[in-house]
Image (cartoon, helix red, strand yellow):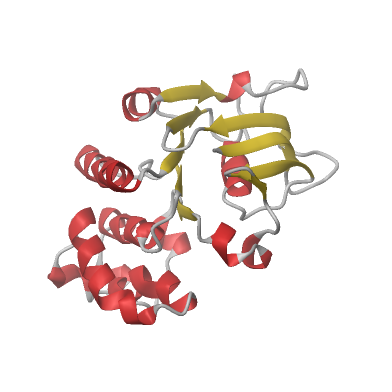
Amino acid sequence: MLELRSVTAGYDRRDPVVRGVDLTVDTGASVGLLGPSGCGKSTLARVAALLHKPDAGRVVIDGEPARGWRHRAPREQRTAFGVVFQQPRLSADPRLTLTNLIAEPLRAAGRGSEAAERVRELAAAVGLGDDLIGRRPHEVSDGQLQRACLARALVLRPRWLICDEMTAMLDASTTAALVHAVEEYRRESGAGLLAVGHDRVLLERWCDRTVHWSELVTDGRMPSGSP
């Protein structure tokens, strides 16, 4: 189980964007987090993935409290998460080929010997052919690059996936392909999913349950970005 308990977080302690939020994703389950742009859901997603230290509250992963954030998190907790962000060009090193982009977490974990086989497997799973994986980000479309970013998120076989507006910039066919790849991975691995977005139809079709951001607000304020 992934638990966020009374999380307060932001980028200015005087005015956090997330205040006292509780959210739970059961093991193997999928939860959609629905809300308008700017409300704080992406910040909460980063806290859940151990990429942003909250000002208060706790993250509990399979019964064990998080013991660090970003590179200071223990490897076994840090690698329990695979994360896909909204804008692939901001999260991909432009110098790397897609092959090296996908393999990057394996090499960082000292498991480079697994890279060739794992990259081939994942490239096929996300729909990237041999003609594409040797290219660099500027030589492929946003959709093709996002496929590579999803493959990178899966390469260490995470127990939890955080998809933060993963399909917001993509066409319908690419969206369907990426959601299918996520669900195939989840079916095989039993991974849990937190999918963040503002497309109610997509989240309700994709996830076991969908939570609206307004349901998580406990301080009486309307979330930023709400009408």
Quarter of the image where the N terminus is located: top right
Can you name the residue that lies furthest to the front here? 63
Residue at (34, 68) in percent of width and height: 102
Residue at (44, 48) in percent of width and height: 86
Picture quadrant of residue 72: bottom right
Of residues 88 and 61, the one nearer the viewer is 61
Q: Position of residue 90 (x, y in %)?
A: 47, 61
Residue 50 is left or right of residue 98, and the answer is right
Quarter of the image where the C terminus is located: top right
Q: Is residue 85 visible?
A: yes
In this rendering, the answer to whether 219 lies above or below 159 is above
Q: Position of residue 120 (x, y in %)?
A: 21, 69
In this rendering, the answer to whether 98 lies above or below 9 is below
Picture quadrant of residue 103: bottom left
Q: Is residue 97 visible?
A: no
Of residues 66 and 95, the one nearer the viewer is 66
Of residues 209 and 110, the one nearer the viewer is 110
Picture quadrant of residue 113: bottom left
In this rendering, the answer to whether 35 lies above or below 151 is above
Counting the numbered discs, the total is 0
Q: Position of residue 196 (x, y in %)?
A: 48, 37
Q: Position of residue 132 (x, y in %)?
A: 19, 69
Residue at (22, 44) in percent of width and height: 177
Residue at (41, 73) in percent of width and height: 106
